[in-house]
Each structure stands twice: as structure tokens, then as C-alpha cells.
Amino acid sequence: EIVMTQSPATLSVSPGERATLSCRASQSVTSKIAWYQQKPGQAPRLLIYGASTRATGIPARFSGSGAGTEFTLTISGLQSEDFAVYYCQQYKNWPPVTFGQGTKLEIE
Amino acid sequence: QITLKESGPTLVKPTQTLTLTCTFSGFSLDTSGAGVVWIRQPPGKALEWLALIYWDDDKRYSPSLKSRLTITKDTSKNRVVLTMTNMDPEDTATYFCAHFISGYFDHWGQGTLVTVSS
């Protein structure tokens, strides 16, 4: 099973600033990683797939990068609606599909 | 427009079997490549993938829960059913179904909270 490790657990950033979230895989997943945003009481929303392709309707301030075992989700010009929990997910080797433990992005 | 909705009991007793239904629209599960998954999330915790069913009835399960899970589909009714046997309080979670595409999940249901308690 591939273990996905996200860091930091909590990230405090001011509105308008840039947030950088990290995800590390225990072995190479090539570019088969997705990122999701989850707000309290809601289902996750797909942001990024294939490590860097934005899903339909996702604003350009969200960008993904990386390959192999190290991945980054960057959110530029943070807006109030961006404060949420973010999960990475690998789909290179499954079952099982595995998720990271999440990064909570909070307002500084 | 793809939509999914979960339904089932909100409370089950320990040792009972849980049956959840995912009713979807906007796609067909007899279309090549289509799939539906179940994912759960204990309160305050991370997401955990449970099971997947493909358009061709191929099924995949979480290795850690495989012995307790069964996933089936009714293509004519646009439904996918998940059963989980021998429920335990640790199975208390919000259960989501989602549309599967090439390894990731692009549309999700709202989720249904299932509490396991006597």
C-alpha cells in the first residue's frame, strides 16, 4: 500500500497571500495524484488530477506540480472561500486508492 | 450533469449489517470506463476508500475491509449498493459515493452519516 503523507497538518496564511501544501508518496506514483478541497459538512471537491491538470471550473489560482514522490498544491491570492482542508490521493497502484491525512488551511 | 446521492440507515447496532444505496444520474454504469466508488470519513478524520464497481461489473475492495464488503450495481435503476457486515463503533463515519474516472473522483454525493451504537 502506498502511503501519502501531507505537510504541514495545519497551515496559517493571510488572505491574498500564497499557500503551498505538500504531499509525499512512499513510492513513485508518477503523476497519478489528485487533490481535493473539503469544507466543513461538505463532500470533497476535485481540484487537480494528473498532478497538474485543473478540474472543470477550478480557478487558475489553484495549481499543482510534482512527479514521482513529491507533489505540491499552490494556491495564489488566497480568498476567504479557500480556507478548508485539502487532501491528496494517489491512483498509481491500487487497490487500495490512498489519501493523505489532509492539510487544514486556516486564516492567519 | 452528474449527481449522486447516498441513502441508508443513520444508526446501526454493533454486529449488524449496513446497507447503503447510491442513486446517481448524468451517466450510465453500462458505459465503458464508468465506475462508482464508496469512500468513508470518520468524524474529524481522513478519507478512506472502500470499494469500486466498474461498468463491466469488475469489483475492487479495500484489502483491509474486503472480507466485510460487497458492492453491487443495478444499471437499470442507476443504483450502486454497498453492504458492510459486522458493524463496529469504529465504522461510525460519513459514507460517500462518487463517480470514478481514470483513478480519481470527479463528482461526489453529499454523504450520509452512519453511527454504530447499541
Image (cartoon, rainbow, N blue to C red):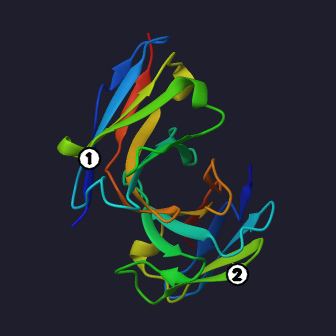
Query: What quarter of the picture does the C terminus of chain A occupy?
Result: bottom right
* Disc 2: which residue: A66
Would residue B92 be visible to someone looking at this image?
no
Q: Chain of mark 2?
A: A
Q: Is residue A51 above or below residue B65?
A: below
Residue extending furthest right? A27
Q: Is residue B55 left or right of residue B25?
A: right
Residue nearest the viewer, comparing A77 with A1: A1
Amino acid at the residue labelled 2:
Gly
Q: Is residue A70 left or right of residue A53?
A: right
Residue depicted at 37% across the width and 52% down the height: B55
Residue depicted at 40% across the width and 81% down the height: A58
Q: Position of residue A5 (x, y in %)?
A: 73, 59
Amino acid at the residue labelled 1:
Lys
Q: Is residue A59 above or below residue B113?
A: below
Residue depicted at 81% across the width and 63% down the height: A27
CA distance separating discs 2 and 1:
34 Å
Residue A78 - label? none
Secondary structure category for the residue under label 1 = strand
